[in-house]
Amino acid sequence: MPIKVSVKGDAKVNIRLKKEGAGLTPSKYLPDIGSLPTNGISISTNLITFMEMRTESVFRPNQEDIEVVYALTGSSKNIPDAIHKFSSNEVVPHASSDRISYYTEKMVEHILEERKSIPELIVIVHTHPKGAAELSEVDKNTHLQVANKMKELVPNASVMFGVHAVSSESRMPRTDPVKIAGNAIKWSSITRQHEAAFFDKNSKPVEVNVWTKV
Ligand SMILES: [Zn+2]
């Protein structure tokens, strides 16, 4: 919930909770978990907040944003319920503004350690700072290889991929996540636009929906 802070003439600080507005309050039109489709993936607004925090937290003053990789996992085939940050050298040996590399085995190790159970769904997402939420040719090849490796390591899990585009910085009003294509969602924080698109291992679009916990 957004908090409004104002300082009065006598230097007393008043903090009051602001009820209206986009903020981190999810829109009322979003479906709840009971009415979610059983195809594709359905991402909660809570998890989207974490996706935003993960990608924006790479910010360093006067330096270009670097790519990050994170994963969404779930104990059902369609609904991710956790995020894995992979902010570790042993998972990500290299990251720059236009390239990232990661070890699939270590990624799975971290996921299993954090979840304490084998997930039914693994969605591996990497960012495109100042780029588009589209797959590059390198992405397409990498995803196929990663999916094959995942099949060996976690045979029952459904594996998908996401590309999360993050704009450069400028002030703007926050907007709630909305679906902009069958496989893509879009929203804004107060400083960056975010767009995330989802694909299967063969680079075919995966249907995505946004929902909210009630
Ligand atoms: Zn990419």
Image: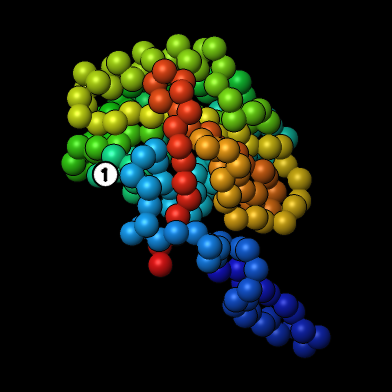
- Quick check: 212 left or right of 58? left
x and y, in percent, of residue 184 in the image: 55, 38
Q: Is residue 80 visible?
A: yes
Which amino acid, by three-letter code, is at mark 1? Ser
Please report the residue visible at 64 percent of the width from the left and 28 percent of the height from the top.
Answer: 132
Residue 70, quarter of picture: top left
Quarter of the figure with residue 167? top right
* In front of the other: 127 or 61: 127
Q: Is residue 125 visible?
A: no
Q: Is residue 187 left or right of residue 75?
A: right
x and y percent of residue 88 in the render? 40, 31
In the image, residue 27 lies at what x, y percent?
A: 55, 63
Compared with 103, 85 (above or below) is below
16 lies above or below 28: below
Query: Along the line of sight, which residue is nearer the eye, 135 or 31?
Result: 31
Residue at 20% across, 37% down? 118
Circle 1 is placed at which residue position? 76
Q: Residues within 10 Å of mark 1 (few under 14, many from 20)?
A: some
Total marks drawn? 1
Q: Residue at x 63, y 37 (%)?
A: 166
Above or below, comparing residue 114 to residue 86 in the picture: below
SS class, disc 1: loop
Name the image quarter holding the C terminus.
Answer: bottom left
Q: Is residue 75 found left or right of 56 in the rendered image? A: left
Q: Residue at x 20, y 29 (%)?
A: 156
* Figure quadrant of the N terminus: bottom right
Quadrant for residue 15, please give it. Answer: bottom right
